[in-house]
Image (tube, rainbow, N blue to C red):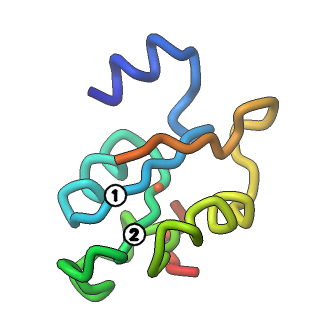
Amino acid sequence: MFDELLAETGFRPEQCVYVGDSPGDALAAGGAGIRFIACLQSGVRRLDEFHPRHLTAAVGTFPEILPAIRALPLRGGGPGAARASSSGGDGRPR
């Protein structure tokens, strides 16, 4: 899925952020080299269920997603760096 999306848009993995709510989302994004933000609003998952290696940041509610993305350091430079994809690094939750 990520390969197709990247090919279609022309973005590089380091320019993207994937937001999801499951450890599987984090693993998939990390495997593709895409930063991952865990959104815990549903209450189904806890932060400790996510492997820190694949976690760039975590938010508790949907409105926190855009500020979390804006707080990420730019990677890959140019327009579109840290562009969000709906459903994530340096491995540290913020």
The residue lying furthest to the right in this view is: 78
| Image quadrant containing the N terminus | top left
Secondary structure beneath dot 1 equals strand
Taking depth in this image into account, of 76 and 86 the one nearest to the observer is 86
Amino acid on which the number 2 mark rests in the picture: Cys
- Residue linked to disc 1: 20
Q: Residue at x 62, y 40 (%)?
A: 83
Q: Residue at x 25, y 56 (%)?
A: 27
Give coordinates of residue 4: x percent, y percent: 34, 17
Q: Image quarter for residue 47?
A: bottom left
Q: How many marks?
A: 2
Secondary structure beneath dot 2 equals strand
Give coordinates of residue 44: x percent, y percent: 18, 78
> Would you say 82 lies left or right of 56 here?
right
Q: CA distance from mark 1 to mark 2?
A: 6 Å
- Residue linked to disc 2: 39
Q: Is 44 placed above or below 79 here? A: below
> Would you say 25 lies left or right of 5 here?
left
Give coordinates of residue 59: x percent, y percent: 49, 76
Amino acid on which the number 1 mark rests in the picture: Gly
CB atoms of marks 1 and 2 within 8 Å = yes
Q: Is 78 placed above or below 36 here? A: above
Q: Image quarter for residue 39?
A: bottom left
Give coordinates of residue 46: x percent, y percent: 26, 86
